[in-house]
Amino acid sequence: MSKKLSPGSVVSFVRFVFQAGIDLRNITKNDFSLFVILQLQLSYLKIKLMSISPPEKGSAVIAGYDIEFCEFSALEYSFNEVFVNQEYAFSSNSNMPCIVDAGSNIGLSVLYFKMLYPNSTIKAFEPSDANYLCLKNNIENNNLSSVSIYKNALSDEEGELEFFETEALKGALVDKSNDKGVDGSFVVQAVKLSPHIEESVDLLKMDIEGAELEVLQELESSGKLKNIKQIVLEYHHIRKKEYALPAILSMFIDANLEFTIGSVLRRPLRPRGRENMIIYAHQQ
């Protein structure tokens, strides 16, 4: 005799289907051809099927590109961030924009930028050993040209930097004293971003897990902040640490950058360990 589905299972399935419908519709908003959009929708469905019994690592085909991943949850999260929510969508007057990708992870953001602007030049920074290896392989195996990769963290000073990882935040720079669950650390070489800003930059994308203020301050003091036309920044605030948002926005104002802030508030409303938001800034 077949088992009856519980009411909770039915509700979960309906929610899953409803969310999938919203996500598939959002993918159609990407500025790609109909064929590529259909490929992305198929990739989305395959990733959802993989999530039923997710592998620890492996590869997935995304819009015809073979993408290695070292942690399935990170692949799923990044796909939603990049292709479903289109958090890094931007427009440029040039068909050969210069892009700096700070915090490239396994390279889905790099892939997105190359799909959007095939002739773009990209500098990609990723300090995590595992992520960097996937990033390197994904760029080389998919013949993504004009992409330079750097196995470095970004900071306001050059030198060695201790890099902590947690189960919840693989590859995240966190303060061990203020974050629970630190289960590993290693040392990486930190560099300043300003020496890599040699000309006008069409887009600076930043997802560097709490180091945003230091990197932006170094760009401001070097006089390179004014060379950046657009910035999309994932701002991460960890409770009990100094709130950096006012200083970041003040820098943008001083640099004549207009900005927009976006965030999704999770319900119920209550204090949480981390606060994340997207800041988009551009020259006036």
Image (cartoon, rainbow, N blue to C red):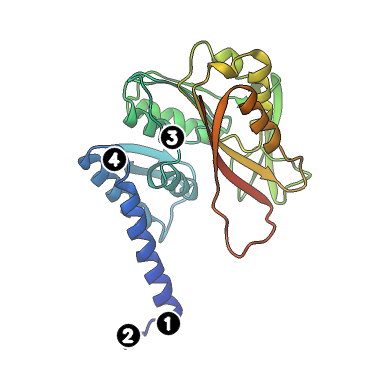
- Judging by the rendered image, the residue that carries numbered circle 2 is 2
The front one of 160 and 206 is 206
Residue 1 image position (x, y, % from top left): 31, 89
Label located before the other in sequence (4 or 1): 1
Residue 63, label in figure: 4
The location of residue 193, given as percent across then percent down, is 60, 19
Q: Position of residue 63 (x, y in %)?
A: 29, 40
Q: Is residue 85 left or right of residue 263?
A: left
Q: Quadrant of residue 235?
A: top right
Please give the residue where the numbered disc 3 appears in the rendered image. Answer: 109
Residue 9 is at least partly visible in this image: yes
Q: Secondary structure at mark 1?
A: loop
Give above or below for 242 relative to 140.
Answer: below
Decide: marks 4, 2 in contact (CB < 8 A)? no
Of mark 4 and mark 3, the one earlier in the sequence is: 4
Comes first in the chain, label 2 or label 3 = 2
Cα separation, mark 2 vs mark 1, equals: 12 Å
The residue that disc 1 covers is 6
**Residue in view at x 56 percent, y 35 percent:** 207
